[in-house]
């Protein structure tokens, strides 16, 4: 099963290192995008061990998801 954009209802395939497709990602405020990238650790998508800080910074995406 391919990894897809995490925006509600979007089925666009994206690399495992990305959270959303380009169209949805650039609807996220830049400050939040920057925070997500700052907590991303290369390879976490393969070892399935993201940090608690990375997971925490993703939480606001759930609130935005209905508007993205």
Image: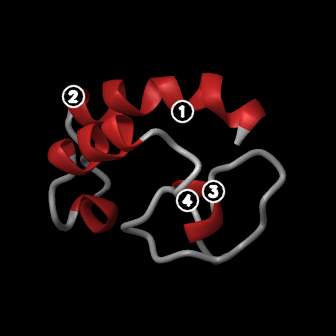
Which badge, 2 or 3, is on the more N-terminal residue?
A: 3
| Mark before the other along the chain sequence, 2 or 4 | 4
Mark sitting on residue 53: 2
Label at residue 20: 4
Image-based side of 7 in relation to 39, left or right: right
Q: Kindly report which numbered mark, 3 or 1, lies closer to the viewer in this rendering.
A: 3
Residue 24 is tagged as 3
Q: Mark 2 to mark 4: distance in Å?
A: 19 Å
Question: Residue 55: where, in percent of width, then height?
Answer: 34, 32
- Tell me residue 12's x, y (percent): 71, 73
- Going from the N terminus, do you reach mark 1 or mark 2 first? 2
How far is the residue under mark 1 from the one under mark 4? 10 Å
Q: CA distance from mark 3 to mark 4?
A: 6 Å
The answer to whether mark 1 and mark 4 are in CB contact below 8 A is: no
Measured in 3D between alpha carbons, the distance from the residue under mark 3 to the one under mark 1, in whole angstroms, is: 11 Å
Residue 42 visible to the viewer = yes
């Amino acid at each position: 099963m391919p990894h897809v954009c995490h925006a509600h209802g979007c089925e666009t395939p994206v690399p495992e290192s990305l959270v959303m497709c380009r169209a949805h990602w650039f609807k996220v405020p830049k400050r939040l995008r920057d925070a997500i990238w700052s907590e991303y650790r290369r390879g976490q998508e393969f070892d399935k061990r993201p940090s608690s800080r990375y997971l925490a910074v993703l939480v606001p995406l759930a609130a935005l998801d209905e508007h993205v």
